[in-house]
Image (cartoon, helix red, strand yellow):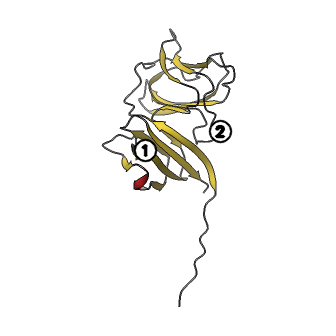
Amino acid sequence: MATLVREVYKAIEAIIPTMTITNWAGFGNQPDGDAVEVLSDSTSDVGLCTIWGSDKTTGELCYETITLNGTTEVKTAKLNWDDLYAIFLGAANGKSITPAVGTITIRESSGNAAITTLTAGEIQEGMLILLLNGKSAEVANASGKIYVNTVELATAANGLYNAGASAGGFSLRVKDKLYIISDNTGCTTQVVILED
């Protein structure tokens, strides 16, 4: 006798829209013990910005979320960033995303040397890092090659690999953080975060 099974699907908590993931290997300039400032050339850029990087003293991965203030620079409370890995225009958990309206510049606090920029419509630069704390995530990419890791910074050597939409995608439970990188300039991907 057949048994009927009622499947209960999890509700969607957040959708990170399709974005470009590049073959990022490090920003050309890094804070190296400095604080970081973020500002835009548009007064309309007033959303959240999450910065992921390492601590100059301990080397540990850390992040800080600040609220942009248009053309007025906003300085991080953290004063000793070493290397930055990711800039994300939203909260660390993937919510409250607001794409750039103008050109947003991330720079060193001392001397104002630029680290990277986000242009209109972009939501991230560098690696994509999300703090999901045990939630499920579905990762699908529309083009190119992406590498996904849930334990450490993703690389082509250690990342779970997906080569385009024909490969389907990943559905995984994320213990803590989700790391995504590409080895293909112009690769695009989308992340859907599901409620517990």
Residue drawn at point x = 59 percent, y = 32 percent: 89
Q: Residue furthest bottom?
A: 1
Q: Residue furthest left?
A: 157
Circle on res. 96: 2
**Crowd band around label 2 with a 10 angstrom C-alpha radius: few (<14), some (14–19), many (20+):** some
Residue drawn at point x = 50 percent, y = 8 percent: 111
The quarter of the image holding the C terminus is bottom right
Q: In this image, 30 relative to 35: left or right?
A: left
**Crowd band around label 1 with a 10 angstrom C-alpha radius: few (<14), some (14–19), many (20+):** some
State which tag comes first along the sequence, 1 or 2. 2
The Cα–Cα distance between marks 1 and 2, rounded to whole angstroms, is 25 Å
Circle on res. 163: none
Residue denoted by label 1: 143
Relative image position of residue 157 (x, y in whole percent)? 30, 43
| Viewer-closest of 174 and 69 | 69
**Callout 1: helix, strand or loop?**
strand
Q: In this image, 179 relative to 136: left or right?
A: left
Q: In this image, 166 relative to 39: left or right?
A: left
| Amino acid type assigned to the residue bearing label 1 in the image | Ser
Residue drawn at point x = 57 percent, y = 43 percent: 16
> Total number of numbered labels?
2
